[in-house]
Amino acid sequence: MDLYAVMEEESRCMSFKARRRLVSAAVNHVSFYKAAGGHLVHKHHGLIHMALSAGRIGNPRCVSTYEDEHENGVVARIGLHVHGSTFAKSVFERLELQNPERRVCDALP
């Protein structure tokens, strides 16, 4: 709720104090969710990155979520074809291969 409150209170260009509150709320959410036994997924990791990038891209409520939703679809399709015992490692490896900007295989001799 704190995360949403900060985003609602702020304009597109967020103050440094608001960005600190946003990051704090994101970290608190992930920490408490994990402590409560919640299953941490890629979206939880992405939440912290979203809060950290608010200084560069502005208030997250003003930014399109197309890339996030597209990546969720890619993760879902990959998840259908990986084994449960290696799920996280397999999904993230294959996700990296789907992203040409992060691909390291082309850089190797």
Image (cartoon, helix red, strand yellow):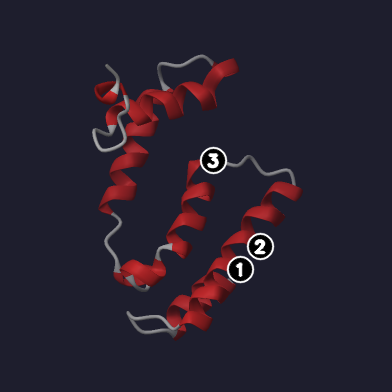
Percent x, y of residue 98: 28, 29
Which quadrant of the figure contains the C terminus? Answer: top left
Give the answer, above or below, for where 82 lies relative to 100: above
Please tell me whether residue 9 is drawn above or below residue 26 in the rendered image: below
* Element on which disc 3 rests: loop
The CA span between labels 1 and 2 is 6 Å
Which of the two discs, 1 and 3, labels the residue nearer the N terminus? 1
**Cα–Cα span, label 1 and label 3:** 19 Å
Q: Is residue 91 above or below residue 50?
A: above
Q: Which residue is mark 3?
A: 41
Q: Which quadrant holds the N terminus?
A: bottom right
> Residue 21 at what x, y percent from top left?
57, 75
Say the numbered circle drawn on residue 24. 1
Say which of marks 1 and 3 sits in front: 1
Tell me the crowding category of disc 3: few under 14, some 14 to 19, or many 20 or more residues within 10 angstroms, Cα based: few
Q: Which residue is mark 2?
A: 28
What's the residue type where badge 2 is placed?
Asn
Q: In the image, 83: left or right of 108?
A: right
Q: Residues within 10 Å of mark 2 (few under 14, many from 20)?
A: some
Distance in Å between CA atoms under marks 2 and 3 = 16 Å
